[in-house]
Image (cartoon, grey):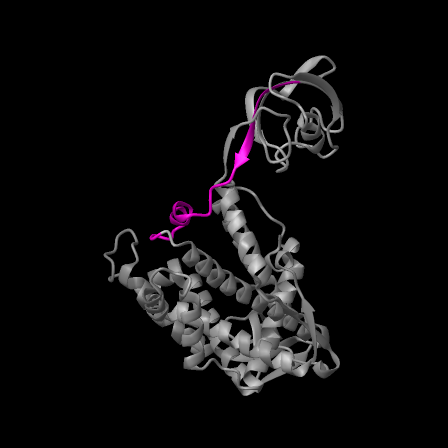
Amino acid sequence: MSSVETLSALERRLNAVVDQQAIRSQVTGKLKNIGRTAKIAGFRPGKVPTKVLEQHYGAQAHQEALGDALQASFAAAVETHALKVAGYPQFEVKTADLNAPEVEYSATFEVYPEIALGDLTAETLERSVFELSQEDIDNTVATLRKQRVTYEQADRAARAEDQVRIDFTGTLDGEVFQGGEAKDYPFVLGVGRMLPEFEAAITGMKSGETKSFDMTFPEDYHGKDVAGKQVTFSVTLNSVEAPKLPELDAEFAKSVGIEDGDVKKLESEIRSNLGREVARRLKGRNKEAAMDALLKVAAFDLPKALIDWEMQSLMQQTVQDMEARGMKMQGVSLPPELFRDRAERRVKLGLILADLADKHDMKAKPEQIRTLIEDLAESYDEPEQMVNWYYADPARLQEIENLVIEENLMAWVLGQCKAGEKSLTFQELMGN
């Protein structure tokens, strides 16, 4: 017999009993297994008497047997009471007498919430839209040319986008500070590598010119010795080099991967690549808007266990990402609470999406999976190999299936909400 108490919105306590005889029979079996390999002085493995095994391993065997019995009893009770358990139960054994015919215990756990969604039809969802133009193609070509810029000597005053080479000495209270001195130091004006005040002082200087000026470092400057303090710089401009962009010709086209140097083919490929990237980013923005709409109308409690798991997962993922970037994280502990908001959002969305996918039959169809894989493979040199790569691994295929389900859900949400549109610029869409 078992009973279930409601402790809070999601917390439950199961009260039940386990037959002591069932535990004892499991203890006997566990001792036999232990005895096959146990190394006890004076006995060969497999020949240790049961009483000797009980003396050495009886408590361990009983604990394992009790644990197995509790788990089996709990699983049966969950099925009997039709409970949807979230996380692991916490067991409490209430019978201290090992000779009692029954072991009474309780298990405290959480259940999944009933998903309650408000009226999506009352919500306006602004769908992001963008149309790729020839200007966007031209600007991308211009960016590619700037990435391959070269510099040539210029007999004039320095200005934005020029590369300059300088000798400089910076002093604080008459003393050169750490990092305040360099010879023939190169940098490009206007790209933000140096502080604005410093660049402003260099702009307009000519080769061979020397000047001194005072400058105050920002309060949050990384060099703590000079942060927030006024220093004096003496600068000599050694050279001014003007930028020279490559011509938009066959040689340039070859340098960016067009083997035959066809400039028209380069523009066509840029258009195709940008089109895919635009579609991907629009899909991401609109999916995020759909998810926000769902969260706005959803009201239900979240299982603490799921949030704790998600916080731990996000924390571990962050540590791995930081290590991958070369940061030393050994011994560094990130507080899980830093990830609570993100964890709660992800758990809540996961529960909503699973519920909607089940209620509205939004399972991924084989043709949808194939289409998405082919779209993803298009950006690779040998698309068919990428398609085969996805289909070769069930885990990779499952990831694609999950993406398709998300797209189906996004389309459903967009269909439920009031329609609105938000036109984006190229810079807004690309995050520039």
Give the camera-side residue of 356 and 51: 356
> What count of labels does the image hold?
0
Which residue corresponds to the image point at 65% horizontal and 58% vertical from the top-left? 428
Using the image as rendered, state which of residue 117 and residue 176 is in the foreground.
176
User: Is the residue 331 above or below the residue 385 in the image?
Assistant: above
Is residue 170 visible in the rendered image? The answer is no
The relative height of residue 43 versus residue 120 in the rendered view (above or below) is above
**Would residue 381 be counted in the magenta stretch?**
no
The reply, left or right, for residue 266 in relation to residue 237 is left
Residue 244 magenta: yes
In this picture, residue 104 sits left or right of residue 400: right
Residue at 45%, 69% (x, y): give it. Answer: 399
Residue drawn at 40 percent across, 67 percent down: 396
Residue 127 image point, x, y percent: 66, 72
Residue 307 versus residue 266 in the image, above or below:
below
* Location of residue 38 with respect to 73 vertically, above or below: above
Residue 393 horizontal side relative to residue 185, left or right: left
Query: Residue 72 at what x, y percent from top left?
Result: 47, 77
**Is there any visible trace of residue 236 in the rendered image?**
yes
Toward which corner of the image does residue 183 lie, by quadrant? top right
Residue lying at 66% horizontally and 83% vertically, measured from the top left:
416
Image coords of residue 168 (percent x, y): 62, 19
Boundaries of the magenta span: 235-260
Residue 44 placement (x, y as % from top left): 23, 56
Q: Quadrant of the N terminus?
A: bottom right
User: What is the residue that sits farthest to the top in this orientation?
Assistant: 174
